[in-house]
């Protein structure tokens, strides 16, 4: 079986408008995606789809027992191949709060900001061709 050239992202945010905006941005970068509104929902989706996911893009503050930082640690422990980007407009994680491989981006964000961040932080083999070619 040939290796898949499709890159999937898991986007997690409890605000439907921000979630849609992030989906549009990552779709423009060449990602397909799964969506979740809570950390718990994200864990369930990962249980079914983690082998296809190359990127977790999550908000920090969400309802439930699993916020974005806890989700980042969970993902880093269980699925170390998944790259992690945490976003927030209210909370900026301090040193040691996030897993070593996780990166942070502030809200509000736009497509140019997110695409540039992903080009700088994702290894080339995890970047969709569309992201590599975007200006």
Image (cartoon, grey):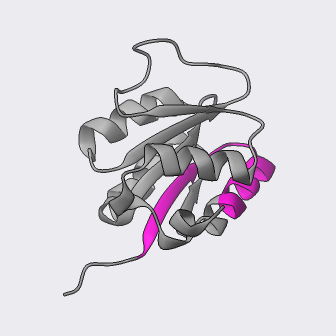
Q: Is residue 121 left or right of residue 81?
A: right
Of residues 11 and 83, the one nearer the viewer is 83
For the point 39% across and 46% down, the residue is: 83
Quarter the N terminus occupies: bottom left
Disc tally is: 0
User: Quick check: is 94 in the magenta stretch?
Assistant: no
Relative to 52, 106 lies left or right: right
Q: Please state the horizontal and vertical placement of residue 67, each as a whole percent of the image.
A: 54, 30
Is residue 63 at all visible to an observer of this figure? Answer: no
Nearest the viewer among 66 and 101 is: 101
- Residue farthest along the bottom direction in this orientation: 1
Q: Position of residue 101 (x, y in %)?
A: 35, 34
| Magenta region | 6-25
Among the 4 quarters of the image, the one containing residue 99:
top left
Give the vertical position of 126 relative to 71 (above or below).
below
Please provide percent x and percent y for residue 6: 42, 75
- The residue positioned 51% from the left and 51% from the top of the image is 119
Q: Image height check: is 65 above or below 40?
A: above
Instruction: State which quadrant residue 91 falls in.
Output: top right
Query: Is 22 colored magenta in this rendering?
Result: yes
In this view of the protein, can residue 46 be seen by the observer?
yes
57, 16: nearer the viewer: 57
Q: Is residue 93 above or below residue 61?
A: above
| Above or below 111: residue 64 | above
């Amino acid at each position: 079986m040939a290796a898949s050239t499709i890159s999937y992202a898991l986007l997690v945010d409890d605000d439907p408008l921000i979630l849609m905006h992030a989906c549009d941005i990552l779709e423009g970068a060449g990602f397909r995606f799964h969506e979740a509104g809570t950390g718990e929902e994200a864990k369930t989706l990962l249980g079914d789809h983690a082998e296809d996911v190359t990127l977790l893009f999550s908000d920090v503050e969400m309802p439930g027992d699993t916020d974005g930082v806890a989700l980042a640690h969970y993902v880093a422990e269980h699925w170390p191949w998944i790259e992690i980007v945490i976003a927030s407009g209210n909370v900026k994680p301090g040193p040691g709060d996030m897993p070593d491989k996780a990166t942070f981006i502030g809200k509000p964000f736009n497509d140019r900001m997110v695409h540039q961040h992903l080009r700088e932080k994702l290894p080339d083999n995890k970047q969709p061709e569309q992201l590599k070619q975007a200006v």
